[in-house]
Amino acid sequence: MRRAVAALIIFTLVLLSPFIVSAASGDWGNTPTKPDLDPGIKADAGSRCVRDVDYMRVNHMDLLKDERTRAVRHGERTDKDSIKECFTCHEYKKFCEKCHEYNTVEPGCFGGSTGTGGCHSTEQPGLKKPEGM
């Protein structure tokens, strides 16, 4: 009986340990402030985004993945939905990093902490240019 009670107490402490540590460190209930979602549009930007703002906030990664797949796997390189097109108006990288940092998401587009280079990095190891390009 004593072993069962001891095991239950240990299990409960292990289960509650993240909450206990958070409360002891003073982080209990603190939420990070939202980043400024200003898209960082350059003053000389003459064109609109390829989609509306609400769509882009939710689906931008799908557009970029589709563009990457068309370019890398099928050799179809166009300016439509290209990340290069995004950076004609938006500040390079700084714009992306604000939201990704707030949401604790590593985009990997330009090369992350893994050092392997991202899908939009110029230093992608092993990436060969498609035939006829």
Image (spheres, helix red, strand yellow):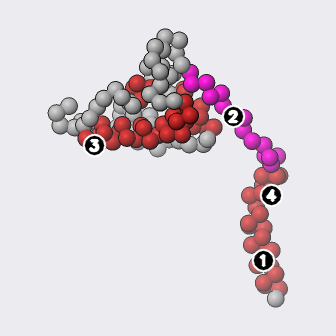
Indicate whether 59 appears above or below 85: below
Circle 1 sits in a helix, a strand or a loop, which is it?
A: helix
Which residue occupies the foreground of this view, 32 or 38? 38
Q: Residue at x 37, y 41 (%)?
A: 66
Indicate whether 120 appears above or below 40: below
The segment highlighted magenta reads: 25-40
Please check the rendered image and state whether residue 125 is part of the magenta-colored stretch, yes or no.
no
Please check the rendered image and state whether residue 28 is part of the magenta-colored stretch, yes or no.
yes
Q: Which mark is residue 34?
A: 2
Secondary structure that dominates the magenta span:
loop
Q: Residue at label 1?
A: 8
- For marks 2 and 3, the one nearer the N-term is 2
**Closer mark to the observer between disc 2 and disc 4:** 2
Q: Residue at label 4?
A: 20
Q: Residue at x 45, y 17 (%)?
A: 47
Mark 3 neighbour class, 10 Å CA radius: few under 14, some 14 to 19, many 20 or more = few
Q: What's the distance in space between the residues labelled 3 and 4, CA to CA?
A: 49 Å
